[in-house]
């Protein structure tokens, strides 16, 4: 039983060779989206952040 499980795991590992893993694509696409949004909304994001910091009051 253990040998069958090991053989299945090894077969699954070999079938993915040469393919870009899904997590790599998700990471690259997320970085691209963040960069695109940041370049478009940079001024507004700075304004929101500055306004939020000014509204915080301490003891």
Image: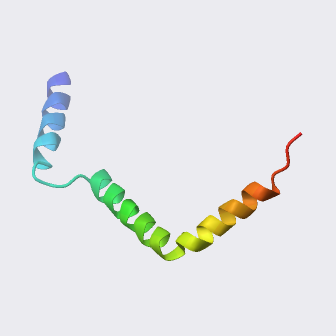
Is 46 drawn above or below residue 5 in the view shown?
below
Horizontal side of 44 relative to 10 (left or right) equals: right
Quadrant housing the C terminus:
top right
* Residue located 66% across and 61% down the image: 49
* Residue located 68% across and 66% down the image: 48
* Residue located 19% across and 55% down the image: 20
User: Which residue is at the front of the view, 57 or 11?
Assistant: 57
Q: Which residue extends farthest right?
A: 59
Horizontal side of 27 relative to 58 (left or right) equals: left
Is 30 drawn above or below residue 1 in the view shown?
below
User: Which residue is at the front of the view, 25 or 52?
Assistant: 52
User: Which residue is at the front of the view, 6 or 13?
Assistant: 13
Quadrant housing the N terminus:
top left
Horizontal side of 55 relative to 14 (left or right) equals: right
Q: Which residue extends farthest bottom?
A: 40
Asked where in the image residue 10 lies, by quadrant, the reply is top left
Q: How is the image coloured?
A: rainbow
Residue 1 seen from this side: no
* Residue located 73% across and 55% down the image: 53
Asked where in the image residue 31 lies, by quadrant, the reply is bottom left
Is 29 drawn above or below residue 43 in the view shown?
above
The percent position of residue 11, horizontal first and vertical second, equals 12, 40
Horizontal side of 48 relative to 9 (left or right) equals: right
Count of numbered marks? 0
Q: Which residue extends farthest top?
A: 2
The percent position of residue 21, horizontal first and vertical second, equals 24, 52
Residue 54 seen from this side: yes
């Amino acid at each position: 039983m253990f040998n069958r499980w090991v053989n299945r795991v090894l077969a699954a590992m070999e079938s993915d060779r040469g393919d870009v893993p899904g997590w790599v694509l998700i990471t690259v696409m997320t970085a691209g989206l963040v960069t695109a949004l940041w370049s478009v909304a940079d001024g507004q994001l700075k304004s929101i952040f500055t306004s939020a910091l000014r509204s915080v009051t301490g003891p």
